[in-house]
Image (cartoon, rainbow, N blue to C red):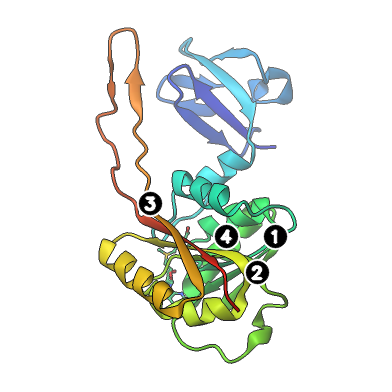
Amino acid sequence: MSYILIDRAGKSHFISDATKNFHTKDGFVKSSDLCDDSVGKEILSSKGKPFYLIKANDSDLFSRLKRKPQAIMRKDLGFILANSFVGKNSVCIDCGTGSGFCSVFLAEHTKKVYSIDVNPENTEIAKENVKRMNLDNVVFLNLDFQMPIDDDSIVSKKVDLVVLDIPQPWEAIDNVLKFLNIGGFLISYSPSVNQVSHTNAKLLESRKFIVLKNSQLVEFPWKITNQVQRPESSILLHTAFLTVARRVLE
Ligand SMILES: C[S@@+](CC[C@H](N)C(=O)[O-])C[C@H]1O[C@@H](n2cnc3c(N)ncnc32)[C@H](O)[C@@H]1O
């Protein structure tokens, strides 16, 4: 059983081994307090600092996944889910896999995810992350999605959503057309606006998609205490642009 030990300020520690005392800078918490009986109760460290114990859930596991390539952040993952509305009967393609954050997130919400990456090293990291999340509905494919794919059978049936997080998404549009259902969504995630321009141009040129929107999401966290009420001092203003398109033509 894994637990989260959390203090009043929200600083949390992941406890993977509850058989040992857990040391913090505010003293240690006895292993005898790291058990189901302590969940929902205040625990005091050896220095008298109050902590709370909760059982680790999927959100906690997700926060601790191994990360190598830049991963899509939660705010943008939420946008992908809300805009495509994929659910328990949906099948998706996620390309590129990277560390697998998007694949894991989609796999939590959908029936099956085909996770595609040209780099086998990244696929290995993503496989490990999928295992840590106890998921069995991700199929990994090592291939270059910016090059023509002749073998249609890599995906057993057409998918409801394709997410592209690769350097030249516009080069992958012909492959997207091979695998995406009519009515299905393409969501392309690109850090740079020149990538967005190229992708839009290619989507319009194909005449098979309607571009619904090109969006940028900014999460603006604030610090709220009795004394201080202002935006947090370090805010990540830009992650990427998200292009949402819908396939309308065969
Ligand atoms: C930024 S990472 C993706 C991160 C991922 N979306 C996540 O949330 O963890 C970009 C990935 O795209 C892969 N990639 C780059 N070009 C590709 C291509 N032509 N076909 C497939 N994958 C590609 C890279 O190897 C890299 O792993």
| Residue type highlighted by circle 1 | Ser
Above/below status of 230 relative to 20: above
Q: Which mark is residue 90?
A: 1
Q: Which residue is mark 4?
A: 103
Q: Quadrant of residue 111?
A: bottom right
**SS at circle 3:** strand
Residue 211 in the image, given as x and y percentages of width and height: 44, 63
Residue 16 in the image, given as x and y percentages of width and height: 60, 39
Q: Which mark is residue 215?
A: 3
Indicate which disc, 4 or 2, sits on the residue closer to the N terminus: 4
Indicate which disc, 2 or 3, sits on the residue closer to the N terminus: 2
| Residue type highlighted by circle 3 | Ser
Q: Nearer the viewer, residue 170 or 200?
A: 200
- Evaluate whether residue 25 shows in this view: yes
Mark 4 sits near ligand 1, with its Cβ under 8 Å away: yes
Classify 10 Å Cα crowding around label 3: few (below 14), some (14-19), many (20 and above): few
Q: Which mark is residue 159?
A: 2
| Residue type highlighted by circle 2 | Val
Indicate which disc, 3 or 4, sits on the residue closer to the N terminus: 4
Residue 1 in the image, given as x and y percentages of width and height: 70, 37
